[in-house]
Image (cartoon, helix red, strand yellow):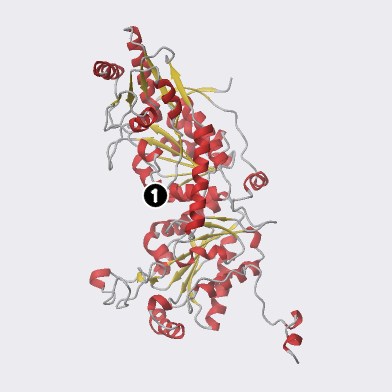
Amino acid sequence: MTIEEIIKPENLAYGKTKVLTDAPMHYCPGCSHGTVHKILAEVIDDLGIQEQTIGVTPVGCSVLLYNYLDVDWVEAAHGRAPAVATGIKRVNPDMHVFAYQGDGDLAAIGTAEIIHACNRGDNITVIFINNGIYGMTGGQMAPTTLVGMKTATTPHGRQVDLNGYPFKVSEMMAQLPGTCYVTRQAVHTPGAVRQARKALKKAFEKSAAKKGLSFVEIVATCSSGWKLLPVESNKWMAENMIPFYPLGDIKDSE
Amino acid sequence: MGELRLMKGNEVIAEAAIRYGCDAYFGYPITPQSEVMETLMDLAPWETTGMVVLQAESEIASINMVYGAAATGKRAMTSSSSPGISLMSEGMSYLAGAELPCLVVNVSRGGPGLGTIQPSQADYFQATKGGGHGDYNLIVLAPASVQEMHDFVGLGFDLAFKYRNPALILADGVVGQMMEKVELAEQRPRLTKEEIVQKTGAWASTGKVGRNRNIVTSVELDPARHEAFNHKLQAKYAEMKEKEVRYEELYCDDAEYLIVAYGISARISQKAVELLRAEGVKVGLLRPITLFPFPEKQIAARAKQLKGILSVEMSAGQMIYDIRLAVGGALPVAHFGRIGGLVHSPSEVVEAMKKLMNNV
C-alpha cells in the first residue's frame, strides 16, 4: 500500500473540527492554550452552536484567540471580559456567550468583574486558565502562583509574608449562588483532555439552559514562564499545581 | 407638537433614551446624576420597549458592559459624573479603538479628586482631548437646556453610529438638576435583530451567519498596520470637523466683543450680554454646541470684527486654549469662571467683560 492509497477521506479516524481555523498558533511549545482551544472548538461544533456563539478574549497570551476559532469575537480590556460578556448576553439572550481569561486577567485585575458576573448569575460560560504566572508579560507572579514558586517578580520564590497566599478562585466562585457549575480540569494527559472536554460541554449546556454562570478552571502549563521543557512542565504541574488545585467538579447545581 | 412636560435634566435623559429606541443602559450611582438610572428603573422599559437596564458593580463594569452590547450593534449607553467618567476613560479609549458607537453622559461636578457634588465644567480637557490613552476623540455635545438634554440623546446616538465612535453628552450639575419645559419625541421602536444585522453586519459580532467571522478589537500588533488604522481614525475626526460642527450665535452681527461659553455658562452669559447691551456695549455670544468638533473656523471668522473675546467657563480656563488656537493670537482672549463647584452670576460676567474692555 502506498501513502496515497491510505490517505483518503474514508480512512479518516480523526478530523479537525471546522470551528478551528487554519491559522498557525503563536503559543510556545508545551503550552496548554492550544489544547484548550481545540476542545473548545470541538464542543462548539458538537453542540452545533457556531453561528450563535460570541466569544470574549482577554488580555494575556490568549488575546489572539480570535484568530483560531471561527466564531464572532469581542476583545476585552484587561480583566473586564465578564462585564463585556454580561453586556453582550443581556442584549442577546439567545446567543451563547463565553469569556476566556488567564489568571492575571481574571484573578488579579479583573476580580471585581468575575465576582459580580458570578453573583448576578449571568447565563454565560467563563473559561479560566490557571498556570500560576503572567505568560505574555514575561513570567511575573500571578495571584495563583504557588508559595515558593520562582517568577520574574519573585526571583527568590513567592513568600507569604511579602506576597500573600495563592488564590483558589474556583472554590470562591462556587460559594456564590449565581454559579450553576464550577469545575477544575487539566489537559496534561489524554484522559484529562477527555474530562475537560466533557466539562466544557456541560458548562455550555447549563448556561444555555439559563441555570446561571458556568465556571471552568483549567490548571495549565507555561513552560516558558516556568523555564521547563514541555514534558517536565506536565510533570511539575501534576506534582505541584494539582495537589494545591485539585481537579474535579466543585459545584454542580440543578 | 409632541408631548410637553416639566422635567429635570437627569430624568429627561432616561425618558429620551427609551423614546429614541435605546437597547441598553448600564450604570452606577453617583451624584449629581443618579436620577438617570432611578428614573429608568422606575419606568421599567424592559416591559415596554424591551430595553435592558442594569446596575453594574462599578463605572468600570458599566462602560465595559456598554462595550459588549455595542459590539453586537446595539444602541447602548451609560451616564455618570466626573470621578466616574475618569474610571470609564479606559473603556472609552477601547470603544474608540474598536470603532464602537455608544452614548456616555457626564453630568459633571467639581474636582479634582472626589471634589464636590456641586456643578462644574472642569472636565472639558478630559472630554475633548481624549481622557483615556491614545490618539482618539469623542464626539462631544454640550446641552444648555433640559430640551437639549433630551434632543442630544437622539443626536448623540445618530452621530455615534454614523461615525462608529463614542459620543459624549458633557452636561453639568445645573443642567442635570434644573427643571424646564421639554417637548418629548414620539416613541421609536427598537431595531429588530434583522435590522441590526443589516445595518451593522459588516463589523458587529451578531453571530457568524452567512459571512466570515467578525472580530471587534482594538489590538493591532503590526505597527505599520496600526499606523494605517490611526490614519483612518484621524480621517474620521477630520470629516467630523468638516461636517458636524454645531454652534449658536446671539447678538453677533455688530459685536465688537464676544463671549464664548457652553452649557449653563452660555445661559448665564446670555443674560450678561443683555445687561451689557442695555448699557450700549456691542457684545455678542457664541455658544459651541459641539465641543468636539469645536467651532474653530466660525470663531476665527467672527474674530475679524472683534476687539476681544471672553471665555466663560466654570473651570480655571480650559476651552480658552481652543479659542486662542482658533484666533491665532490676533486679539486678546481672556478667561472668567467660578471654579470648584460655584456658579458665576450674570453680573460677575459683566464685570469680567468690562475688565477685558479696559485692558484692550
Counting from the top left corner in percent of width and height, residue A223 is at: 43, 78
Q: Quadrant of the N terminus of chain A?
A: bottom right
Counting from the top left corner in percent of width and height, residue A161 is at: 23, 71
Q: Residue at x 38, y 71 (%)?
A: A133
The quadrant in which residue B106 appears is top left
Up the image or down, A4 lies above or below B332; here it is: below
Q: Residue at x 46, y 77 (%)?
A: A247
Letter of the chain that mark 1 sits on in the rendering: B
Sort mark 1 into few (<14), some (14-19) or many (20+) by Cα contacts within 10 Å: few
- Regarding residue B143, the answer to whether it shows in the image is yes
Up the image or down, A124 lies above or below B356; here it is: below
Q: Residue at x 50, y 38 (%)?
A: B238
Counting from the top left corner in percent of width and height, residue B344 is at: 29, 23
Up the image or down, A201 lies above or below A229; here it is: above
Q: Label 1, secondary structure: give it.
A: loop
- Regarding residue B62, the answer to whether it shows in the image is no
Q: Quadrant of the C terminus of chain A?
A: bottom right
Q: What amino acid is at disc 1?
A: His
Q: How many marks?
A: 1
Counting from the top left corner in percent of width and height, residue B150 is at: 50, 29
- Which sits in the foreground, B174 or B46? B174
Left or right side of A7 for A246: left
The quadrant in which residue A209 appears is bottom right
Q: Which residue is mark 1?
A: B133
The quadrant in which residue B124 appears is top left
Left or right side of B13 for B115: left
Up the image or down, A195 lies above or below B9; here it is: below
